[in-house]
Image (cartoon, rainbow, N blue to C red):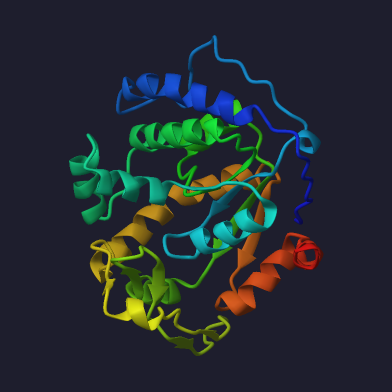
Amino acid sequence: MAATLTRLSKPSSSLSHFRRFISSSSAAIASETTNPPSSLTFNNTTTLSRKDPKDRNVQWVFLGCPGVGKGTYASRLSSLLGVPHIATGDLVREELASSGPLSHQLTEIVNQGKLVSDEIIISLLSKRLEVGETKGESGFILDGFPRTIRQAEILEGVTDIDLVVNLKLREDVLLEKCLGRRICSECGKNFNVASINVKGENGNPGMSMAPLLPPSHCMSKLITRSDDTETVVTERLRIYNEKSQPVEEFYRSRGKILEFDLPGGIPVSWPKLLEALNLDDYEEKQSAAA
């Protein structure tokens, strides 16, 4: 399935409706029992004026295991298309760093490799969309949301998703990639010290990924995320496969999913992804215009 790009300057009101909806829905979700009904019911007064895709920017979702590179590719597409990249993982880390009311609870969840609850994710996303609305943002690329059927149903109930990009990578490569992640404690940028060179076997192709090394002034300031240990990463992947992969089928049944197997590192995968999205000519035109 290929993506069709339509970008006009007219702003969309869908973010406003989404923000108001999930704000009013958080309390309802939190009050449900541990065995919620399969059909979710929310505030009946909530309404949504859905825009034709020609009248708004793209509304995409990026799926994939933790560490597969959703943030990297979503961020690049965000810059290319001029739409906000909203990563729930970043929202969680910002809340952790803020020492806010959820900070202690989130610290325990993240360090144990567990998934953050729907209530917390929806609350953080609501706040982010409210800030974006004040800046006049239109459209979005969601990274890390939805990750459960429940969240997908909430999202489908309030706005249209044009395309879901499902990034895939071999699990052994994923593990090595996650363990190589580093963050500069001063500038906050992400790097990766892993040099991956896996031979093809059992029907799986070989794969090479060069390390993403920091500039010299960041090298001595690199730190490892507390949740990037082999035990935590392995548990995180297990939970993802158990809880989040059904979301893939949710969108697959609606004909909105683009399966993309990463063939290697960024230099190899980025042009292939643009080609799959029918955006390879678009990047060239943007570069020429600049």
Q: Quadrant of the C terminus?
A: bottom right
The residue at the point 52 percent across, 30 percent down is: 154
Q: Is residue 199 left or right of residue 278?
A: left
Q: Position of residue 65 (x, y in %)?
A: 45, 60
Q: Quadrant of the N terminus?
A: bottom right
Q: Is residue 198 left or right of residue 259?
A: left
Is 155 situated above or below 282? above
Nearest to the observer: residue 49 or residue 39: 49
Is 97 situated above or below 118? below
Is 123 situated above or below 263? above
Q: Residue furthest top?
A: 45
The answer to whether residue 243 of the structure is visible from this angle is no
Q: Is residue 209 left or right of residue 119?
A: right
Q: Is residue 2 left or right of residue 110?
A: right
The residue at the point 44 percent across, 76 percent down is: 173
Q: Position of residue 157 (x, y in %)?
A: 58, 26
The residue at the point 65 percent across, 43 percent down is: 253
Quarter of the image holding residue 236? bottom left
